[in-house]
Image (cartoon, rainbow, N blue to C red):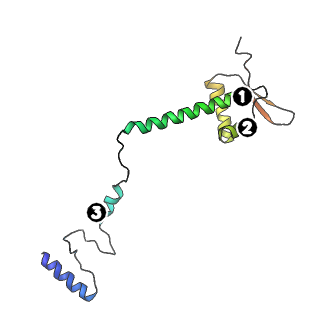
Amino acid sequence: MASENTDQATEANERGEQASQPIDGNQSGATPDKPAQKKVAKARTQTNVKPSRFPGRAADALENVSAYAKLNKTEMVLKRLRQAKGATVEMLMEETGWQAHSVRGFLSAVVRKRLDLDLRSDVGKDGVRRYRINDTNKDA
């Protein structure tokens, strides 16, 4: 069988053609026009990611970092809201890097509902809406 493949390959090569069967004995039927199906499927399932020596540590570290960043942003926003003048949405956007709808959602969901703080909204003479936390009622 191997000698037949070699003879066919030699004859095809002399004519400038490709052999109909692979020389190396691979029965996949791969030609330059049509790649082998097994190799393509195998390439799709392989990944270049090495398994970690400590699989749980990287995920734990990322969770701790993101929780720490959220706490810091929460503290920054609350500090701004506790000022006498309060804070505008634009000020909070610059401080946190959030978009306007995210800032308003945070004020509604976290400050008012989860933390149960008295959040006041006032429009000043300049027409800009300012948010502030009213701590006077919580002391009583």
Percent across and percent down for residue 10 are 20, 84
Q: Amino acid at mark 2?
A: Met
Q: Is residue 129 left or right of residue 108?
A: right
In front here: 17 or 54?
A: 54
Quarter of the image for residue 19 reads bottom left
Q: Is residue 3 left or right of residue 96?
A: left
Q: Of marks 2 and 1, which one's residue comes earlier in the chain?
A: 1
Percent across and percent down for residue 137 are 73, 15
Residue beneath label 3, please? Answer: 38
Residue drawn 13% across the image and 78% down it: 3
Q: Residue furthest bottom?
A: 15
Residue beneath label 2, please? Answer: 91
Residue 66 is labelled as none
In front here: 83 or 38?
A: 83
Q: Amino acid at mark 3?
A: Lys
Under circle 1, the secondary element is: helix
Q: Of marks 1 and 3, which one's residue comes earlier in the chain?
A: 3
Percent across and percent down for residue 66 are 53, 36
Q: Nearer the viewer, mark 1 or mark 3?
A: 1
Residue drawn 73% across the image and 39% down it: 90
Under circle 2, the secondary element is: helix
Between marks 1 and 3, how big is the CA–CA gap?
62 Å
Residue beneath label 1, please? Answer: 81
**In this view, 130 is above or below 33:** above
- Count of all numbered marks drawn on residues in the image: 3
Q: Nearer the viewer, mark 3 or mark 2?
A: 2
Q: Is residue 69 left or right of residue 40?
A: right
Residue drawn 35% across the image and 45% down it: 51
Query: Which quadrant would the C terminus be assigned to in this image?
Result: top right
Quarter of the image for residue 42 reads bottom left
Q: Amino acid at mark 1?
A: Leu
